Amino acid sequence: MTKPKSRREVLLGAAALAGAAYLPRAASAEGKGRIVVGTWGGDYARLLNKNIEVPILIKDGWEVVQDQAGDPERRSKMLAEVRLPRGTSDVQGLSALNMFQMHDAGTILPIDYGKLKNAANLLPSMKYPYGIGQIYSGKVGVYNPKLITTAPTSYKDVFDPKHGNKLGIIDIQYQYTMVCAALAAGGKVGDLEPGKKLLLECKNAGMRIYPTNEAFAQGLKSEEFGIGVMWKARVVQWQNAGISVTAITPTEGALAYVSGFVIPKNAPNKDGAYAYLDAMLDKGAQEAFAVDMGYNPTVTNAVVAPDLNKRIGFTSDEVKKLVDLDYDYMNKNDVDFKEWWDKVLKS
């Protein structure tokens, strides 16, 4: 497979059935149809409903149902359903890496951008052939100044075994955490072995592993630990919630993150799928996600207040140093990485 276009180019442009149905199924009198959305739960699911589904789609007559689960479970479900004439979801929310994986597995449709009126405002490199980037951020170092008195400046400073049980990582972010650790150990995005060795050293020193982003935030809030890595967008949310946490862009370059949506090949309502994709690119929806979740918009007509942009965005120099995943490498080795994570690091 050809490696997708660099996320650095994306951001340079910007700088210049596991889960239950989640929220209302209400539809207006027109009754346009039902859209089933595969998504993570928590804050993200709530904000999809608040900023996209209720004000745009449900208002316009669509019925929207969220099927919430972790992305490994949802990707497994897509693979299991791929030969069925009719699947159970119309769109699936995935990271850029997981979008590539599902494309490589032959489970998703190419995107017809001619069906999306808001595609004209989409950043060019967010137009994947097989999916669409909705929001983006970068993986930064996070710390509580009360517990970590010497401010970190790099991934290497974060993944230092000397922190002992004051270092925390997140189970569901195993892919990105392993890459950050590899960069901290002097490795590369295409060679995670140095990172695996460093993570084991941190584990032996007392490193904590939290199951979810929300559990990680609670640990920060209770001062159970004091340093780790997280998306810059989430840090803004936590700061808004009164958690004592500071973000630093690592000197190695922040690992870029893009979240988006794909359409399964056997989606039962493809018109509804395109309606959802178009709604997520709506100017108002994109601006609301920047305010509510701290992620950067992927459309050029969205307006972000200067003070908020300073908190959620990256400088031109930081954008130039953003680090891309090697999607093909990660895809080919993901099963082995997950097995090592579960059976070795977490054991």
Image (tube, rainbow, N blue to C red):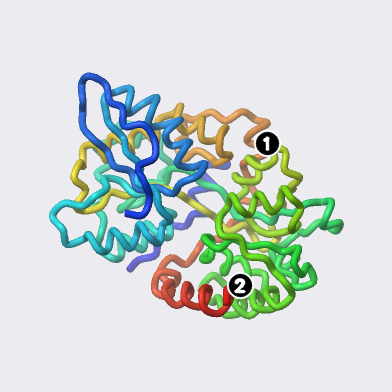
- Mark 1 or 2, which is nearer the eye? 1
- Quadrant containing the N terminus is bottom left
Q: Earlier in the sequence, mark 1 or mark 2?
A: 2
Q: What amino acid is found at the position of numbered circle 2 in the picture? A: Ala
Residue 332 located left or right of residue 158: left
**Residue located 74% across and 67% down the image:** 165
Farthest-out residue, right:
149
Mark 1 falls on what kind of element? helix
Q: Position of residue 127 (x, y in %)?
A: 37, 47
Residue at label 1? 240
* 225 left or right of 270 in image: right
Q: Where is residue 319 shown, x and y percent of the image? A: 60, 51
In contact (CB < 8 Å): disc 1 and disc 2: no
User: Marks 1 and 2, Cα distance to the nearest angstrom?
Assistant: 31 Å
Q: Position of residue 262 (x, y in %)?
A: 32, 49
Query: What residue would you read off at disc 2?
Result: 182
Total numbered badges shown on the rendered structure: 2
Give the image quarter of residue 31: top left
Give the crowd class for mark 1: few <14, some 14-19, many >=20 residues within 10 Å: few
